[in-house]
Image (spheres, coloured by chain):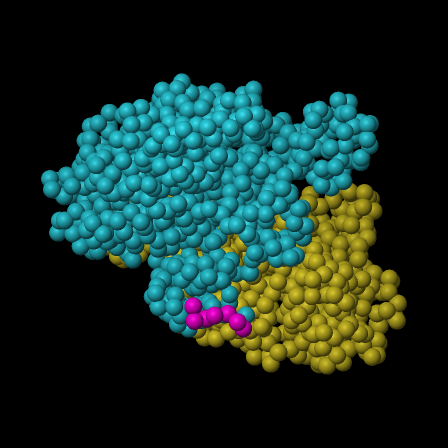
Amino acid sequence: MPRLTIDQTTVTVPEGATVLDAARAAGCDVPALCYRQGCRPLTSCLVCLVRDCATGRIVPSCGTPAVEGGRYESETAEVRAMRRSALELLLSEHVGDCLAPCFFGCPARMDIPLMLRQIAAGQLRAAIATVKRDIALPAVLGRVCPAPCERACRRGGVDAAVAICRLKRFVADADLESGAVYVPQPAAVTGRRVAVIGGGPTGLAAAYYLAAKGHSVSLYEREDRLGGRLWRETSEGELPRDVLEKEIAALLAVGIEVFCGQAIDSPDQCESLLTRCDAVVLCCGAVSADAAARWGIGHSGRGLEVAPKGFATSRQGVFAAGCAVRGKAMVVRSAADGKEAAESVDQFLRGETPVGPSEPFNSRIGKMAAEELVQLAAGSARLPRFEPSDPMIGYAASEAAAQAARCLHCDCRKQGDCRLREYAAKYGASPRRFAADRKPFSQDLRHAEVVYEPGKCIQCGLCIELARAADEPFGLTFVGRGFDVRVSAPLGRQINEALQRAAAACVEACPTAALAWKHDGSARPDGSAR
Amino acid sequence: MADLDLGYVDQVVERLGRKPEAVIGILQALQRRYRYLPRAALDRVCEQTEIKPADITGVATFYNQFRLKPVGEHIIAVCHGTACHVKGSGLVQSAFERELKLAPGEDTDSFGRFTIEKVACLGCCTLAPVVQIDGRTFGRVAPSHVGDVLADFLSHCGNGKSPAPAGGGVAAAAHEGEVRVGLGSCCVAQGSGKVHEAIEQALRQGAVAAGVKRVGCVGMCHQTPLVELVMPDGGNKLFTKVSPEDAGEIVLDHFRPRGWWRRTSRAVARWLDRWANGAGPPDSRCAGVDRRDPVICAFLGPQLHLATEHGGRIDPLDLDEYLRNDGFAALRKCIDQWSPPRIVDEVKQSGLRGRGGAGFPTGLKWDRVRQAAAEPKYVVCNGDEGDPGAFMDRMLLESFPYRIIEGMAIAALAVGAHEAILYIRAEYPLAVERINAALARCAERGLLGEGLLGSRYSLRFRVQEGAGAFVCGEETALLASIEGRRGMPRLRPPFPAECGLWGKPTLVNNVETYALVPWIVRNGAAAFASIGAGASKGTKVFALAGKVRRGGLIEVPMGISLRQIVEEIGGGVPGGRSLKAVQVGGPSGGCVPAALADTPVDFESLTRVGAIMGSGGLVVLDDADCMVDIARYFLHFTQDQSCGKCTFCRVGTRRMLDILNRICEGRGRSDDLDQLELLAVEVQRGSICGLGRTAPNPVLSTLRYFRDEYEAHLAGRCPAGRCKALIHYRITDQCIGCTLCAQQCPTQAIPMTPYARHAVIDDRCTRCDTCRQVCPEHAVVVE
């Protein structure tokens, strides 16, 4: 049994093991995409690189046999930089969005495609959970939001954008009328106290997410009812008052102590609040320079001065968000601020640097040509966008499901288990380092259960091996050579003929979403989870 | 497709077998028959054999040779080798595309008459730029003359071209003299075949008793067709650039026809001809020169012929002549006197290193294979010479087939192999033909096969044709190809010496390496080791081309300087231009600047200056060559030839090319040079095979020595005036208004203004250079 040294750790591995096995045994999380237990090493992705101390060479660990006395470096800056470059090269030809354009269109970064798939599958309980993970007031926003998400929606380039905002309202209304409104699973009580000043959209959102994180939240509102500018800036026709009231009541169910009619604006009040609470979040709407001075916080000209990330003011433990910082903002922007400030405060309370939520790793296709959109649209409902038969009531359940099925599924089918994304995030790989003209987008939907997206393929060859091992009559092969090589069914056959037996193994082994299930676990049309 | 004769598929399968490894041979046979690979034929192969659909598709789409679409009646192969590139092959290619009115992305004209193909290198570097139409070679093709080339081709195409004569010459009667005609394939491209025919005809008509002998390459490609006369008294005369018309004359002038009547009538006829045509003295270029002529001496003087011993003197296929010239003496010695360890030891002592590029000690490799326990063992000759601008191996295979066979036999004996395989690229039909003929003749005499030279040692040879993939020059890819797979290199170790063909110990050496072995065995390791410099012993064969007066194939002792090669052997840079750099080692090598021209040619020194020995292409560059363009040219080649397996090579070389394209097109960014350098080093370090590891060399070496040129491009200037996006054509007041440029301009970018100065409309101009070439007044300038 050979003994090897990986960085400073000496390990013994079984005969026939590879350096990758040894490095992992030594506790290094060596990334690998084309490697799979039980398959011969393909040494194609080249992200599992290590440095052979004997020769100074950088080698793929998956294909290097472990031999007695071998010494390798795994977690050095040099090796990690090489791994990152390999990932960046793969990303430079990756034609795929991790997250859909609508996700980035939404200031609150709501997982819109997931919500749409849940609606289409009739899973409204799951849909409201998805919505409320990022939007605390969906029934309100479903009525007053200018829907920047819909401007980003790719379906707009085909016929008309998916009615995202309407559908979100449908989910929220259904929840409010269900008789048992959705309340997130409460987190363990932390014992930390947070005061939120202002019960408008920002304050409500901040209070909601802080409470959901297990903190004890006191919400102070100068008026005698919560809602702030939502009352002032909207009409009954736009936002029926009963909806507003019901939604606020539903939100409070998470467990928030409310103090209405209590303005906090004298320095004394501030000080006493700060002594009683671990953190204070100022969500009190537009703030004058004088008011800022009372808080002992600088004024940017628009509002309270905060750190570039994380909403922290210059006073320890005091945060500010929404119009208090921006002067004015869309309601959805305020609600998003509230959610992000809550995240930041939570980080602060856990002793971390308060920076708010981190931007998720994302590979981006960018603008798509008309013929690409046609391909992309092939998998979604051909139905045109239509408004609800009764605009006041909104979509009927069947209408909503049909409209939601218009979603093109721009987001990745393997968001959670794409290893390329996982390692790219971990290694801080930049998809833009080798920005280049991208290959055209295409997707193959001929297989009943599997979607093949060549643009996401990293040519690792695992599916070819697995199809061969399963003795597929046609199987898959590399076609062409060099940069233009692609994986394809042979002799003019199609993917459905190629993967008659090995589909499940190939989808599971594929390190990206080049081969993915058509319908992901949460929302197959029949509602069953995979 | 209904009328496709699938019975032929069955015949081919019957002949070549049903095993997966037969796939490449089967595809080659099918393509010879159908000119492309029809789907129905491939389906049929899968039905009839153990070859799987996935494998046949993978192989058919990997190799350049295979076509999956029908092609036009005639194929125009435009050579994009290095020498052709620097002499404007890109312009020639676009000129053909315009002439045939091809839509963008199309390769066949609408009448289905011609299909254009880019080829990496036709190996006629001294004729650059070169195109081949159905095997007929046209040299020095100017973009403005592509119409004439097509017309010329079509006017001859009914008559059929004369292929290189395959049979032996007129039997030689040694004492009555000998006519030697160089018939390597580049000589044939220059018309040596016709010269050979003309001589034979003249000798028959004149009843001259001299023998005509086809000989291998002399290396003086700049002077072909080459005819050497060996007089009955032993003296010789060399005639260069001989035309078929001149050939008969030359022979009859020097050998006395039999019988006084023939002699007299010939003299009278000649006198009458001259008188009638008012011809002056015979063309001076056809005057015979002695091998002692100063120019010839300069070319041949510094050379030393070991691998090319007897070059230009012996008939490549004449086995008796080979035997008379010490042929198989080395093998005989090994069989009769030396044990395998003794042979290996001799090779080790000689200091011979692999001539394929990396320079691994040959003896060490032999020893590893010899000591490997597994059986059987294989000996493989790597004849997949793919570097653009390199044709040494082709020349050796064509001119010295027996010597290579002998070298391989010695190696087989030394390592204990009983099967020897020559892998030769399909682009070298004459080499394949000669090796096959040589093997057949050896077999007829019982020299090979069951009993090697009559001993009890059995050794079987076979030839496998490559199918057009540069990467198959990498040994593990080459072995994959022999096994009938896509030529994808794999990670080493294990090395082929332990785990090679079919997982068995395999010795893979380059053609030139094997060619040197008989010399070493006959003359002793010490004799070989006494030649050369430092750790680089013996000689190296190079293909010398580019901006040099005398291009050709040369064999020089290691340690000679690049300057000696360029100036003494090559006669320096022509046209009053100055030497800028020498590109050594092709796409894996680098550019050695003129300031370092005294660098000795040995493995270590070349590596030190950022080049490599490589397989032996030497392309001389002058001050009109753009170094950024050269780097881009080579990278374009390797990028295109990457097998596509590992990320650094597949994507990394492409991203490097993106940056270089940007720079050449004037869209470079300020951090591009740093990015390029960083990525180049990463590709070098991260790639798993030699192709990827060396592909950045041309970029890194030009960045090292010519960074100022890159910077000029970033500033929007191409100092050499080569990069189309950065140059403009202008007509000066030298213009006499002859309208020639306006008539010739393919894009109507020059309005016709008779008797007045012309002008170029810049945004219509495609920089095809035609106007500059046709202008009689040199009034067109590039700025």
Which chain: yellow?
A: A
- B655 lies left or right of B428: right
Please tell me how many numbered marks the rendered image carries: 0
Query: Does residue B778 appear to the left or right of A91 in the view shown?
Result: right
Q: Quadrant of residue A99?
A: bottom right
Q: Within the image, what quadrant is residue B732 found in?
A: top right
Front-lying residue, A316 or A389 = A389
**The magenta segment:** B2-8
Which residue is drawn at the image coordinates 65% and 49% (left, top)? B100
Quarter of the image where the N terminus of chain A is located? bottom left
Residue B5 lies in magenta, yes or no?
yes
Q: Identify the residue at horizontal 24%, vertical 25% (top origin).
A: B530
* In the image, residue A38 above or below residue B661: below
Q: In the drawing, does residue B659 fall left or right of residue A262?
A: left
Q: Which tint is chain B?
A: cyan
Most common SS among magenta residues:
loop
Q: Residue furthest front?
A: B261
In the depicted structure, whether residue A473 falls above or below residue A420: below
